[in-house]
């Protein structure tokens, strides 16, 4: 089970994370680390990754992720990402997925992980 981005609305995400750990059904938290995009909240996402580093729960970074910025998330230890408008033509949910954007993210992921 994934807890959705309502998590981004709480005042204290670390406390909320500890509350969610009480529910073994929840395996990951979809989050941008707070208001804005994942790139706006790299420090908070890194703190959440630290808090879950020895847990069964994972952080699923989301919001604003595209081929131009995925490496920044990888550098802080993100291993799970959720992409949406960042991989669509015109970065719009009303447009189809741009397969080339997916290839670029996969390429960035592969290059980063082999080094």
Image: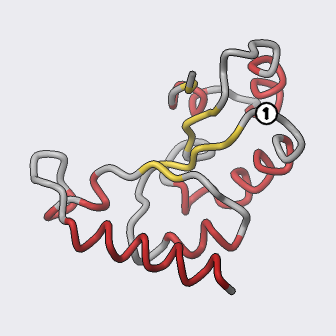
**Residue in the foreground of this view, choosing between 13 and 22:** 22
> Within 10 angstroms of label 1, few (less than 14), some, or many (20 or more) residues?
few
Left of 65 or right of it: where is 98? left
- Pick the quarter of the image with the C terminus: bottom right
Residue 5 at x, y percent in the picture: 51, 31
Residue at (73% x, 59% y) in the render: 43
Q: Is residue 8 above or below residue 25?
A: below
Residue, far right: 54
Q: Quadrant of residue 107?
A: bottom left
Residue 91 position in % (x across, y down): 22, 60
Q: Classify the position of the N terminus by image quarter.
A: top right
Q: How many marks?
A: 1
Q: Is residue 3 above or below residue 50?
A: above
Judging by the rendered image, the residue that carries numbered circle 1 is 56
> Residue placed farthest to the front in the image?
114
Residue 87 point in image, percent of width and height: 28, 61
Corner quadrant of residue 73: bottom right
Give the camera-side residue of 12 and 26: 26
Image quadrant assignment for residue 22: top right
- Give residue 29's position: percent from left, percent from top: 62, 33
Residue drawn at 75 percent across, 16 percent down: 24
Considering the numbered disc 1 on the image, is that residue within a helix, a strand or a loop?
loop
Q: Residue sitting at 65 percent across and 26 percent down?
A: 10
Q: What residue is at 58 percent from the left and 52 percent from the top?
A: 80
């Amino acid at each position: 089970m994934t807890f959705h981005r309502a998590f981004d609305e709480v005042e204290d995400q670390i406390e909320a994370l500890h509350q969610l750990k009480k529910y073994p059904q929840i395996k990951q938290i979809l989050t941008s680390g707070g208001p804005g995009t994942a790139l706006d909240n790299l420090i908070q996402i890194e703190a959440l990754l630290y808090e879950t580093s020895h847990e069964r729960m994972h952080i699923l970074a989301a919001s604003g992720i595209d081929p131009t910025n995925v490496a920044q998330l990888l550098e802080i230890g993100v291993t799970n990402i959720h992409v949406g408008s960042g991989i669509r033509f015109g970065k719009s949910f009303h447009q189809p997925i741009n397969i080339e954007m997916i290839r670029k993210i996969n390429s960035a992921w592969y290059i980063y992980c082999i080094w």
